[in-house]
């Protein structure tokens, strides 16, 4: 035994040394426990949440909006509970936890701008979650550390909406009431006035989405009568969107570094998208879609011979993907076209000026705000024209020298676009609302799940569904499997409110 004493003694010294530094070494320096300035959390929260929305938009969002081919082919294999966290954004609760931390610090230190920004970002995330699922954990959510709540209660969607509108109202009051610079803001570069505009636009989105259940007239009129507190977007230049960086793969457009296999073989624009764009002779067609590969022949092909073809959603695997159009070059990965794909041509879009204008057009046409059809026509045309200006700027001269021969001015239509019967703001009130809905749906390409949300709310445009899918388009996403196990009682309450945790179940506003 004596011969082991030196070894035991040395081991004791080693363990003592380890124990002395254990807490310091094994504490994550990026943990909120170490946070003294809330700004250090913003960059990761913004990048992660916007990229999550962008990636989900490509894989499921525009698909659910029936704008990409591989919608509901097969047996809903991509709509399983196991996909809720990533594809259906349940992992936003990780970012909400960090934003709760920001709010706690901001309240303690009197940092109103930080709290206002966090409230707007958190409201956008909760809006996505409740519009995807219906009832969700809300006020108790992501508070295990701050309040010791490990199994948060769900709240009905009407309560969530009321809470979000209250949070945005508070944000509109807080933003600009203190002078601190918001560090880590990679959306608006610490421009608090633009966060106020984002807050207003999000309020209008929520008010219109719940308008079948709650009359938005008073709230919308109050917003329009108080432009200082509730400023509106003035153009696409100040809308809520994340710019990607050309000199960094890590901060580039999320699809840029992905494999081309899905882009080349399976993801194709839908017949619904192509037919609607062709109906309008819409110059966004070559922006939203590439010509079918079989129509691109020769070393210097003529764009006049290009064919744009969409697949019928739910009609099963394509016999030959080359006969159909892939999404446009703005969203192409580098491996598909190294000389044409761009790290920064596309943006991670959250909420656009166009969407806000279309919401106001609908509100005016329905009498929720003053102005009637005259005001509605102005809002409607503003929304359309800004879309063309936006994509003309994003395309710029990037593709003029390529086989696409697509220049910025090619995306700007002449006046005949606006006077054609399918676009001109004329007809019955129902016909006008259908025109607003179609243009809004088209404008929401690659804006998260918004095209699907709006289709569910308005029913426009009419969707063609193939024969090999289930024969319907989902009305919501399924709760993640973990909720059925670790938060069982609260999950059961949510299902009771819904009627069934089913893809066909409608959420509160979808009536």
Image (tube, rainbow, N blue to C red):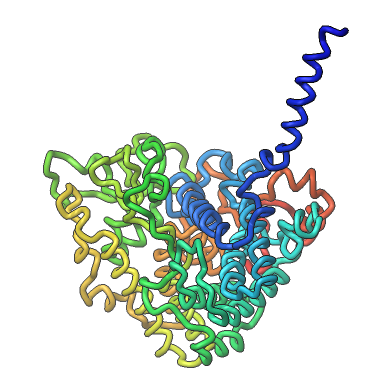
Q: In which quarter of the image is the N terminus?
A: top right
Front residue (pair 298, 195): 195
Q: Which residue is drawn at 69% across and 73% down?
A: 163
Residue 230 is left or right of residue 108, and the answer is: left
Residue 350 is left or right of residue 410, and the answer is: right
On screen, 2 above or below 372?
above
On screen, 277 above or below 333?
below
Residue 25 is left or right of residue 338, and the answer is: right
The answer, for residue 511, to whether it is visible in the render is: no
Q: Residue at x 56, y 85 (%)?
A: 220
Q: Which residue is drawn at 53% across and 74% down?
A: 180
Q: Which quadrant would residue 409 be assigned to in this image? A: bottom left
Question: Seen from this angle, which residue lies furthest right?
Answer: 1
Residue 66 is left or right of residue 89, and the answer is: left
On screen, 281 above or below 307?
below
Q: Position of residue 340 (x, y in %)?
A: 25, 46
Q: Where is residue 99 in the image (x, y as percent from the top left)?
A: 63, 61
Front residue (pair 506, 389): 389
The answer, for residue 397, to whether it is visible in the render is: yes
Q: Which residue is drawn at 40% across and 90% down?
A: 374
Front residue (pair 269, 312): 269
Q: In which quarter of the image is the C terminus?
A: bottom right
């Amino acid at each position: 035994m004596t011969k082991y004493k030196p070894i035991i003694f040395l081991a004791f010294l080693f363990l003592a040394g380890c124990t002395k530094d254990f807490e310091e070494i094994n504490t994550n320096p990026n943990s909120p426990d170490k946070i003294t300035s809330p700004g250090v959390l913003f960059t990761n929260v913004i990048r992660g949440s916007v990229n999550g929305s962008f990636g989900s938009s490509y894989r499921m969002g525009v698909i659910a909006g029936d704008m990409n081919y591989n919608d509901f082919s097969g047996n809903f294999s991509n709509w399983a509970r196991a996909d809720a966290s990533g594809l259906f954004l349940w992992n936003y609760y990780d970012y909400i936890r960090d934003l709760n931390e920001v709010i706690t610090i901001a309240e303690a230190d009197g940092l109103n701008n930080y709290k206002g920004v966090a409230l707007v970002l958190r409201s956008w995330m909760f809006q996505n979650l409740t519009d995807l699922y219906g009832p969700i954990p809300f006020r108790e959510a992501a508070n295990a550390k701050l309040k010791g709540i490990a199994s948060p209660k769900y709240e009905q969607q009407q309560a969530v909406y009321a809470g979000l509108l209250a949070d945005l109202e508070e944000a509109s009051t807080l933003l600009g009431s203190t002078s601190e610079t918001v560090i880590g803001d990679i959306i608006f570069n610490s421009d608090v006035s633009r966060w106020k505009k984002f807050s207003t636009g999000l309020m209008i989105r929520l008010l219109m989405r719940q308008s079948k259940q709650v009359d938005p007239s008073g709230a919308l009129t109050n917003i329009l009568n108080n432009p200082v507190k509730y400023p509106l977007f003035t153009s696409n230049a100040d809308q809520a969107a994340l710019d990607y960086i050309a000199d960094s793969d890590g901060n580039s457009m999320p699809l840029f570094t992905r494999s081309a296999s899905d882009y080349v073989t399976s993801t194709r624009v839908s017949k619904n998208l192509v037919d609607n764009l062709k109906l309008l002779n819409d110059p966004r067609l070559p922006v939203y879609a590439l010509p079918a590969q079989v129509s691109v022949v020769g070393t210097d092909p003529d764009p006049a011979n290009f064919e744009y073809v969409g697949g019928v959603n739910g009609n099963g695997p394509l016999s030959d993907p080359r006969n159909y159009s892939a999404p446009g070059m703005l969203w192409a990965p580098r491996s598909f076209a190294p000389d044409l794909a761009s790290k920064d041509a596309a943006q991670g879009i959250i909420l656009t000026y166009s969407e806000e204008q279309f919401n106001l057009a609908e509100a005016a046409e329905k009498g929720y705000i003053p102005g009637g059809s005259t005001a509605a026509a102005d809002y409607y045309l503003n929304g359309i024209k800004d879309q063309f200006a936006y994509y003309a700027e994003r395309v710029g001269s990037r593709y003029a020298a390529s086989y696409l021969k697509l220049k910025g001015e090619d995306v700007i239509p002449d006046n005949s676009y606006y006077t054609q019967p399918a676009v001109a703001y004329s007809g019955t009130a129902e016909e006008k609302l259908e025109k607003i809905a179609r243009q809004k749906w088209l404008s929401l390409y690659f804006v998260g799940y918004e095209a699907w949300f709006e289709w569910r709310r308005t029913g426009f445009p009419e969707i063609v569904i193939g024969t090999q899918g289930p024969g319907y388009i989902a009305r919501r996403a399924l709760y993640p499997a973990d909720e059925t196990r670790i938060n069982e009682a609260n999950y059961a309450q949510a299902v009771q409110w819904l009627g069934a945790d089913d893809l066909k179940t409608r959420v509160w506003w979808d009536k």
